[in-house]
Image: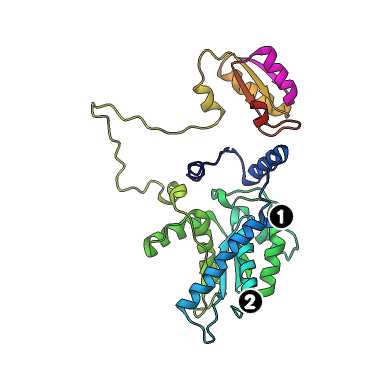
């Protein structure tokens, strides 16, 4: 759904079948080879400058809800957000710092940093009192929060938590999906899984007695539930109707299948010659086996893009299967 939305705004979207960290590496390699600007995340000035305005809105609107005696804006006692790399709360923290320097608020909020349990390098480092977070392998269905290596984001957020008495905790996938369901039914709030992780963390902080009834608490919630319908609803529909064609035939479903196997099933029968270009010999051999298990293709391999181009010119294949990130030349340039 999010990829389609990006495409709607005119972006050229390349879908990466891998983790968040792998997708970022592909983007980094592509930007370096094309001499393009790459948003560096926690060190990005535009990102932090944009996100800090959320702090401005929070403080201004809280003052309207609960006016202060001296007429200043009001900072919450706690600001809680689910994080992956951490750019969100880093930018918002910067906004509250600027409000303090301008004298518009009289205190900094405590930060509640929530990570999904299956990918919580910051939380693990926080519990152990470490200055740096060690990368982990993500194991969560909530892909938006699946950044295994938070980089310097942890250092910044750790310092912010230490300065104000904040904390870092984790919540598992199940708790997040249950929180999503409760909020939709009780409050009419429709959120995406990443935001519901923050509310699962909120419930945990309340249970542990860290949040007080008289405190002002702001939880960042955004997005929509569509990417997670199957995890929340499972098979609990009132009725699942399969409507047939007016002439009695079942309407065809437009289920989108992905992967090499699905692509091979759709290949024209006239495709007989295939060239594989991949700088990893093991990967190219695996692709060769998959191809030849499907059909007796004539398969040729090249383990660098320049040799691959020569092979394409020589063999004139019906199909080229290329890696996206390779030394000397990336897959995009190769196709061009």
Q: Is residue 239 left or right of residue 203?
A: left
| Residue annotated with mark 2 | 102
Q: Which of 252 and 74 lies nearest the eye of the viewer?
A: 74
| Residue at image coords 73%, 54% | 134
Quarter of the figure with residue 180: bottom left
Residue 206 seen in the figure? no
> From the viewer's perspective, is residue 17 above or below residue 320?
below
Colour setting: rainbow
Residue 5 seen in the figure? yes
Alpha carbon distance from label 2 to label 1: 30 Å
Q: Is residue 208 left or right of residue 312?
A: left
Residue 283 placement (x, y as % from top left): 68, 28
Label 1 CA crowd tier, 10 Å (few <14, some 14–19, many 20+): some
| Residue at image coords 50%, 54% | 193
Determine whether the residue tagged by mark 2 lies in a helix, strand or loop.
loop
Q: Are marks 2 and 1 in contact (CB under 8 Å)?
A: no
Q: Which of 326 and 53 lies nearest the eye of the viewer?
A: 53
Q: State which mark lies toward you, 2 or 1.
A: 2
Determine whether the residue tagged by mark 1 lies in a helix, strand or loop.
loop
| Residue annotated with mark 1 | 151
Residue 123 placement (x, y as % from top left): 65, 61
Label 2 CA crowd tier, 10 Å (few <14, some 14–19, many 20+): few
Quarter of the figure with residue 239: top left
Q: Which residues are magenta?
A: 298-317
Q: Which of 88 and 244 lies nearest the eye of the viewer?
A: 88
Q: Which mark is residue 220?
A: none
């Amino acid at each position: 759904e999010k990829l389609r939305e990006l495409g709607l705004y005119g972006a050229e979207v390349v879908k990466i079948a891998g983790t968040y960290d792998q997708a970022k590496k592909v983007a980094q390699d592509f930007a370096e080879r094309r001499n393009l600007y790459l948003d560096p995340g926690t060190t990005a000035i535009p990102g932090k400058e944009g996100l800090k305005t959320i702090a401005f809105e929070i403080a201004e609107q809280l003052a309207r809800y609960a006016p202060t005696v001296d007429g200043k804006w009001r900072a919450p006692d706690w600001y809680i957000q689910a994080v992956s790399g951490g750019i969100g709360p880093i930018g918002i923290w910067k906004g509250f710092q600027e409000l303090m320097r301008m004298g518009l608020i009289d205190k900094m909020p405590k930060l509640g940093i929530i990570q999904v349990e299956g990918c919580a390098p910051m939380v693990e480092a926080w519990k152990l009192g470490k200055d740096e977070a060690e990368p982990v392998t993500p194991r969560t269905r909530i892909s938006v929060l699946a950044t295994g290596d938070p980089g310097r984001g942890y250092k910044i957020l750790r310092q912010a938590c230490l300065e104000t008495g904040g904390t870092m905790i984790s919540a598992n996938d199940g708790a997040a999906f249950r929180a999503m369901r409760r909020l939709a039914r009780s409050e009419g709030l429709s959120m995406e899984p990443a935001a519901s992780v923050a509310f699962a963390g909120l419930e945990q902080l309340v249970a542990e007695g860290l949040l007080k009834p008289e405190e002002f608490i702001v939880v960042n919630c955004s997005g929509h539930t569509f990417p997670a319908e199957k995890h929340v609803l499972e098979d609990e529909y009132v009725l699942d109707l399969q409507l047939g064609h007016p002439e009695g035939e079942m309407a065809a479903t437009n289920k989108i299948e992905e992967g090499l196997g699905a692509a091979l099933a759709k290949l024209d029968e006239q495709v007989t010659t295939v060239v594989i270009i991949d700088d990893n010999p093991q990967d190219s051999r695996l692709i060769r086996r998959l191809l030849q298990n499907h059909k007796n293709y004539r398969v040729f391999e090249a383990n660098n893009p320049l040799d691959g181009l020569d092979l394409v010119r020589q063999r004139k294949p019906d199909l080229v299967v290329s890696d996206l990130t390779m030394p000397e030349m990336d897959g995009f340039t190769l196709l061009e």
